Image: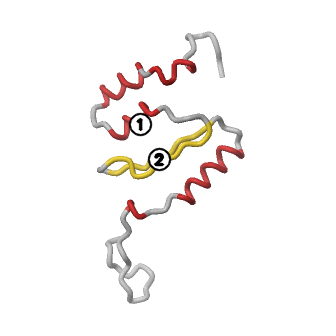
């Protein structure tokens, strides 16, 4: 729907809402409850636009920052290198065929 159209049928123009003015508090609360209700280790949410990260939040275990490059960096090959070589998740890496979830 175009900004300025009469979505509610009131005769008043509908204001354009920019993503930078959005309040993500409701979404954050829903995700936080979801993580807690299901006893998950954690979750992360990143909202991005063409300019970059608009909103970022993590619950539970911290988010591995290098993994965000897939949303921010246009070079997926470089992003893969960063993910594969980051020391931030070394404690979570297990040898193949040694543990199963």
Identify the residue position indicated by label 1 in the image: 68
* Residue 35 x %, y %: 65, 44
What residue is drawn where x is 44% and y is 63%? 22
Q: Is there a contact, CB below 8 Å, between mark 1 and mark 2? A: yes
Which color scheme is applied? secondary structure
Q: Is residue 58 left or right of residue 81?
A: right
What residue is drawn where x is 34% and y is 79%? 5
* Residue 96 position by quadrant: top right
Mark 1 Cα shell of 10 Å, populated few (<14), some (14-19), many (≥20): some
Distance of label 1 from label 2 (alpha carbons) = 10 Å
- Quadrant of the image containing the C terminus: top right
Identify the residue position indicated by label 2 in the image: 56
Q: Earlier in the sequence, mark 1 or mark 2?
A: 2
Please, is residue 95 above or below residue 23 in the view?
Answer: above
Please, is residue 51 above or below residue 41 in the view?
Answer: below
What residue is drawn where x is 45% and y is 46%? 46
- Counting the numbered discs, the total is 2
Mark 2 Cα shell of 10 Å, populated few (<14), some (14-19), many (≥20): few
* Residue 69 x %, y %: 37, 35
Q: Is residue 2 left or right of residue 87?
A: left
Please, is residue 83 above or below residue 45 in the view?
Answer: above
């Amino acid at each position: 729907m175009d900004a300025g159209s009469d979505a509610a049928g009131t005769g008043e123009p509908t204001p354009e809402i920019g993503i930078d003015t959005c309040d993500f508090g409701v979404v954050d609360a829903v995700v936080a409850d979801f993580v807690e209700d299901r006893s998950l280790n954690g979750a992360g949410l990143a909202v991005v636009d063409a300019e970059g990260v608009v909103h970022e939040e993590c619950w539970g275990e911290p988010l591995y920052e290098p993994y965000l490059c897939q949303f921010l960096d246009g070079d997926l090959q470089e992003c893969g290198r960063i993910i594969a070589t980051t020391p931030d998740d070394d404690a979570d890496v297990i040898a193949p065929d040694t543990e199963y979830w």
